[in-house]
Image: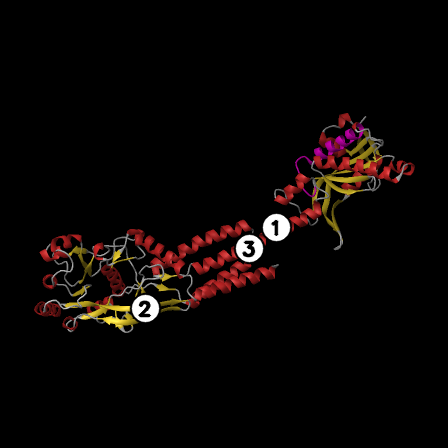
Amino acid sequence: MKEKVYLWLFVIYLVAIGLYMMDLFKSFEYWIINHHFFIKYLLSEEQKESPIVIVGIDENSLKELGRWPWPRETHIALLKELKKAGAKVVGMDLIFDQPYDAMVDRSLAETMEKIGVVLPITLDLTIYRGFLGEEIEVNKIYRPLPVFDRVSRAGHINLIPDLDGAIRRGFNYLDGVPSFALQIAKLYQPEVTYPDQPFWINYPGPARSYPTYSYVDILKGNYPRNLFVGKIVLVGALDPALGDQFVTPFSQFGLISGVEIHAHQLNTLLTGDYIKPLPLHYGLILLTIIALMSGYSAFRWKPITKLSVFILFSIGYYLCSFYFFINHNLLLPYFPILFFLGGSLIVGMLVSYFLSNKEKARLYETFHRYLAPQVLQQVLDGTKEIELGGEEKKAAVLFIDIRGFTAYAHSHRPKEVVDLLNQYLKLFAEVIFAFEGTLDKYLGDGLMAVFGAPVEGKDDLKRAFFAALEILKKVIEKELPLPVGMGLAYGPVISGNIGSYKRMDFTVIGDTVNTASRLEELAGPGELVMTEEVGKLLDITEELTEEKVEIKGIEGMITIYRLKKE
């Protein structure tokens, strides 16, 4: 069984590694990432000061300046205002790929030249996604008009969604074309080296995370003094009617405009706060350690313990991953770990279930002949426990014998003998089970019963005594032809499975058993003989006949009590 369990755990481990290496947990990981961003935002204090300011084409601007697109003279006026206000770099998330008026276009280009301006490039892309990763193919490049391209920098504004449609990554280069945010960053901080590879955008929050002002207010000069001095100004559409809206990790707050996503991407480049997924080889080491721990605990913990540990570990690991996310910008793999733990938990539960059923079957096979049905059910349900090895405990031992049975057997036909014997033994068993005793063994025309082993009960001695009285009573009531004699002793016994590896039976042994057997031999027809200890513990000595007798195996005379049922 152990070998099969470890094999299944190893298979789950290999599947988890395969799915992890093929990045097939990505869709699930996105949910964790979104949650990390959300909690981080809720716990964060005021956002750190950023050099980015957004000038938005919002609903108010559209009302005052008219329907989009506006005359390019309007953009000339804005750029002049921003130049006068001290802006260092202006990123215009506006498409200038069609001619307007030659003189106006030249004037706009001249104005752009006087202030550092970055314009957008749009790329026609084809995205291929498969088990082995993602491939992006650039089909066509749409640059600004040459008149503007010559006097400004340009970068692509393509935002590539993940499988769930959210924008989480920035692509500094697509087929060699730099991004809009990268061009702005290079113009603002030319001395800094920026990564060539895609990176996770470190979103500080939802929409309006940066100082945002209406386009028309800037034209009118309605803005704080020194607002734009040395700053990066991003100009773009904010009004949802213009359609430049995207899903992000903060979509529970609503969609975010493209210009704001460029701002988040740019801020990540400027601060260098890149989110770093845990390197694959470290993730595999982590998964291996957890797999070894799971294998170690597979046969050592009960199902409820395994489930509790699974829940606590999942919560603890999430908190740990969140800690590394907010303090070190490190993204730990979550669902590969959860997948393996969940798989190992299911295997562990199934193993526990099958082992439990196997153990129940073994207990039933061992004890259904000895125990009362209700007691056996308690044992199988786990309400009562049984020690199958040798165990010393105190128990009441009752021996019962049919008096005169040998003479009866000689004078009657075999069938009559067997039928009568079965009547007696059935009666004995029913009474013993009714008082929750254990039918240890049949002894020819009698039997041995135990109260207190293998299952300890309440008032074992009292139950044994009243069971003996009930048997004496039933024999008389049923008018059975032969009386019975019984011996009852109470004391320490050794209980357990005894025998060879081919045949083992439960029984009890010890001086108490020998004493009860000897007392049964002393009992007359219809009598119950018990030890002095039994009489005193039951506090019934005044109603009994006391005698001093000598019993084989015990030195000296001992006191016994007789009870006769008329």
Color style of the picture? secondary structure
Q: Which residue is mark 1?
A: 356
Determine if residue 487 is in view.
Answer: yes
Image quadrant assignment for residue 481? top right
Q: Is residue 53 above or below residue 561?
A: below
Q: CA distance from mark 2 to mark 3?
A: 46 Å
Q: Residue furthest left?
A: 103
Number of the label disc, if any, that sits on residue 348: 3
Q: Which sits in the foreground, 409 or 554?
A: 409
Q: Residue at x 51, y 51 (%)?
A: 307
Q: Residue at x 64, y 52 (%)?
A: 358
Question: Which portion, as a residue range, is magenta?
Answer: 453-476
352 horizontally vs 229: left or right: right
Q: Report the predominant secondary structure element of the magenta stretch.
A: helix
Q: Which quadrant is home to the C terminus?
A: top right
Q: CA distance from mark 1 to mark 3?
A: 12 Å
Image quadrant assignment for residue 114? bottom left
Q: CA distance from mark 1 to mark 2?
A: 56 Å
